[in-house]
Image: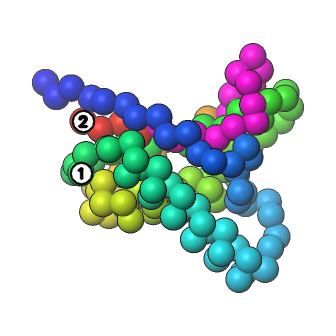
């Protein structure tokens, strides 16, 4: 049986920089996507996650308040974040053979916030 290790990557943004409800100019969105990929890539390298064949990734967001939030809107941030993990060389591609993405989780109080993080499970 293979032992799994879970890494928590604390992200530098208090709120997700992208969501599917935003309407921004395509050039602005491209810049934000590139920043997310870069930031997550460096954070993944700093966490010393070993290169592997398969990972399970979940994006987490604690808004710091109660209210309604659609977790699927957060995939606009989790997708480029996973691309950043690929850019860091943790896995070779973000296809279903190498990456399993779990639906983003929203954590309401008492979890302090606002903050974002990723969990990366390596088997």
Rendered location of residue 10, percent (x, y): 55, 39
- What colouring method underlies this structural image? rainbow
Q: Which circle, 1 or 2, is nearer the viewer? A: 1
> Which quarter of the figure has residue 25?
bottom right
- Residue positioned 47% across, 50% down in the render: 43
- CA gap between label 1 and label 2 equals 11 Å
Q: Is residue 61 above or below residue 89?
A: above
Label at residue 79: none
Write the start and end of the magenta stretch as one range.
106-119
List the residue tagged with mark 2. 123
List the residue tagged with mark 1. 51
Near mark 2 (Cα within 10 A), the count class, few <14, some 14-19 or many ≥20, is some
Hey, which residue is sitting farthest top in the picture? 110
> Which quarter of the figure has residue 32?
bottom right
- Residue positioned 64% across, 59% down in the render: 76
Near mark 1 (Cα within 10 A), the count class, few <14, some 14-19 or many ≥20, is some
Q: Quadrant of the N terminus?
A: top left
- Residue positioned 68% across, 42% down in the render: 71
Rendered location of residue 82, percent (x, y): 46, 56
Rendered location of residue 98, percent (x, y): 29, 54
Labels 1 and 2: the sequence-earlier one: 1
Find out whether residue 110 is within the magenta segment.
Answer: yes
Rendered location of residue 58, percent (x, y): 50, 41
């Amino acid at each position: 049986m293979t032992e799994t290790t879970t890494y928590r990557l604390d992200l530098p943004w208090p709120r997700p920089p992208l969501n599917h409800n935003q309407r921004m100019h395509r050039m602005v969105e491209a810049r934000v996507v590139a920043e997310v990929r870069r930031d997550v890539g460096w954070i993944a390298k700093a966490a010393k996650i070993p290169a592997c064949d398969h990972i399970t990734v979940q994006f987490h967001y604690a808004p710091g308040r109660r209210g309604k939030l659609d977790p699927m809107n957060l995939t606009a941030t989790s997708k480029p974040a996973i691309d950043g993990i690929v850019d860091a060389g943790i896995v070779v591609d973000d296809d279903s053979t190498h990456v399993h993405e779990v639906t983003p989780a929203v954590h309401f109080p008492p979890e302090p916030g606002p903050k974002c993080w990723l969990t990366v499970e390596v088997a």
